[in-house]
Amino acid sequence: MSTSPFLSNCTADTIRSAAAALKAGHLVAFPTETVYGLGADARNPDAVKRIYQVKGRPADHPLIVHISSINEIDKWALDIPEYALKLAREFWPGAMTLILKKSEIAKDFVTGGQNTVGLRVPSHPVANALIAEFEKISNSAIAAPSANRFGQISPTCASDVSAEIGNFLSSTDIILDGGRSNIGIESTIIDCTNNVPRILRNGSITHEDVLRINNDLQSQLTKTEVKFSGSFERHYAPNCKVIVGRESIQGEGFLALNTIPTPQGMIRLGYPESDDEFARSLYSTFRLADSMHLKSLVVVEPIGPGIAKAIRERLSKASYPLESP
Ligand code: TXA
Ligand code: MG
């Protein structure tokens, strides 16, 4: 177990203290079902500024505001289209972030100066309890990016949070330890500012799920879906070189579904039995490769629809070359 001074277990009492810490302007890293978030009071400019400092993240990158339920949506967003409400009713609490036109209380310091706000209701019981408790005492919500340094791998357990950002936290900040994140990759982000939804980042809520809930929009949706290409092509990357394919490199790391045999001379780092397990363990496998000081990690990507698509998106970013060609 990590000896980080910030780590706290999750009881009703520690969650109440964490909510009070947020109210006092401190940072609280907390578990969600996707990855761990680094939270601050979404209405406190100084607290939000500290998130950017701890992450080393440029100030024009917007944060997701985490709310306790769909009932809070009107507080943070305006002109919400019916299709967005349908998605929220179906998939919240869950691994879906909606980008909506922002209301007056969603300030530029949270939205990176955009006129939109990202909203999510996580389903992890600790996240839920923390957000609900914080809303009760503050009339605010929790702004939180993934709890990693900018461009690095999102943490999926509390000790990974501590390894990522422990050196940048203050003694009054807290890391709530709620075990391992069950999904393991970040939420699906859906732009809801036009007449049809558009997926900006793939996740466990899939294109097919969005279509199912809004089948009246089917023809337009298929046409307008575009893959998010953020301002930084390389992201979610370990220090070792991620190679997507079936190369065989002596003494280097290998990750594939358990049905695929290990090439001779390679070090097998995982045997995920399903796409869900692949997603759940992907980032911890990246961290394992780095802790073993491997130079390369060869990954055979899962080929299916659904979450496999989100895994492929992460792998394409993780394998993007460091230097421009
Ligand atoms: O699963 C998740 O989404 C996790 C957990 C903690 O909720 N959070 C997360 O946050 O992954 P972050 O900041 O690491 O990634 C959020 C992405 C960023 O690429 C950001 O640019 C985009 O969401 N985003 C947030 N608000 C936005 C907005 N108003 N417009 C466009 N993109 C937005
Ligand atoms: Mg992130």
Image (tube, rainbow, N blue to C red):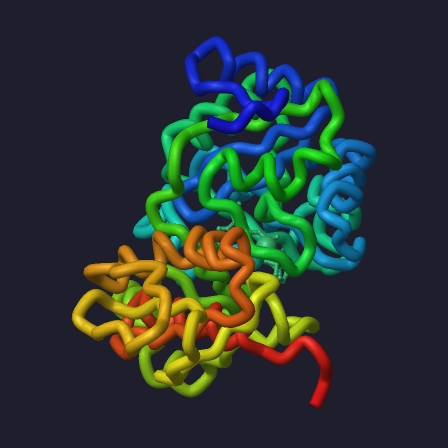
Indicate the quadrant of ligand 2 in the picture: bottom right
**Number of numbered tags placed on the structure image:** 0
Q: Is residue 184 above or below residue 268?
A: above
Quadrant for residue 129, please give it: top left
Whether residue 306 is situated above or below residue 272 in the rendered picture: below
Residue at 60%, 40% in the rendered image: 163
Q: Residue at x 62, y 35 (%)?
A: 39
- In what quadrant of the picture does the C terminus appear? bottom right
Task: Tell me residue 49's x, y (percent).
Answer: 80, 40
Please give the name of the residue rendered at 56% of the width and 62% of the height, measured from the top-left corner: 238
**Residue 234, percent from left and from top:** 63, 72
Q: Is residue 273 left or right of residue 144?
A: left
Q: Residue furthest left?
A: 259
Of the pair 91 and 85, the residue shown nearer to us? 91
- The residue nearer to you, when weighing 80 against 107, is 107
Q: Specify whether residue 86 is in view.
A: no
Residue 323 versus residue 251: which sits nearer the camera? 251
Give the farthest residue toward the bottom.
Answer: 325
Q: How far across and how far down the image is residue 269, in percent?
A: 36, 60
- Residue 292 in percent (x, y) is at 50, 55
Image vertical order of residue 302 relative to residue 125, above or below: below
Question: Is 242 on the left-hand or right-hand side of 139?
Answer: left
Residue 268 appears in view: yes
**Which residue is pictured at 36% across the width and 54% down the height?**
281
Is 300 on the left-hand or right-hand side of 16? left
